[in-house]
Image: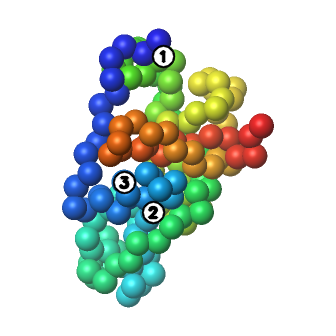
Amino acid sequence: MAEGARPLPASTPETKHFWDGTRAGELRLQRCDECRHTYFPPRPFCPKCASRKVSVVKAAGRAKLFSYVIHHRPAPGFTPPYAIAVVELDEGPRMMTNIVGCAQTPDALVLDMPLEVTFEKQTDQITLPFFKPAGGK
Ligand SMILES: [Zn+2]
């Protein structure tokens, strides 16, 4: 079993739309109204053209495994071995996350494997988005 509680992020004015989204079962990104660039993590201006005209959009929740490392040491809230992964969303942005629903081994974690988002409530405020193999049983 994992020892202790996993450290959790806190909702801030910049990230409120994101955490409101995960609580509602949606992965929310931001898209620039000027240049149409879709980005993550949340910020109040477009990282490409610096426009402040940005909208919140719901992501499809599909991604592919871009990169990962497998940790073998225990950490609060984690049971080793566990993978810290970077996934690339269909919309383009990359996100650091955990892969759930499969073995945490190089055999099971194949780069470019299709993934889909899944949500796990941690507290009343924070629900974390994780990714699992797409089309899983
Ligand atoms: Zn822009």
Q: Which residue is mark 2?
A: 28
Q: How many marks?
A: 3
Q: Which residue is mark 1?
A: 80
Q: Which residue is mark 3?
A: 19
In the depicted view, which residue is nearer to us: 123 or 99? Answer: 123
Within the image, what quadrant is residue 62 found in?
bottom right
Q: Answer whether residue 72 is visible to the viewer in this image.
A: no
- Tell me the SS state at disc 3: helix
The span from disc 1 to disc 2 (Cα, nearest Å) is: 29 Å
Q: Amino acid at mark 2?
A: Arg
Q: Answer whether residue 56 is visible to the viewer in this image.
A: yes
The span from disc 2 to disc 3 (Cα, nearest Å) is: 8 Å
Q: Residue at x 58, y 57 (%)?
A: 61
Q: Residue at x 37, y 13 (%)?
A: 3
- Tell me the SS state at disc 1: loop
Q: Amino acid at mark 1?
A: Pro
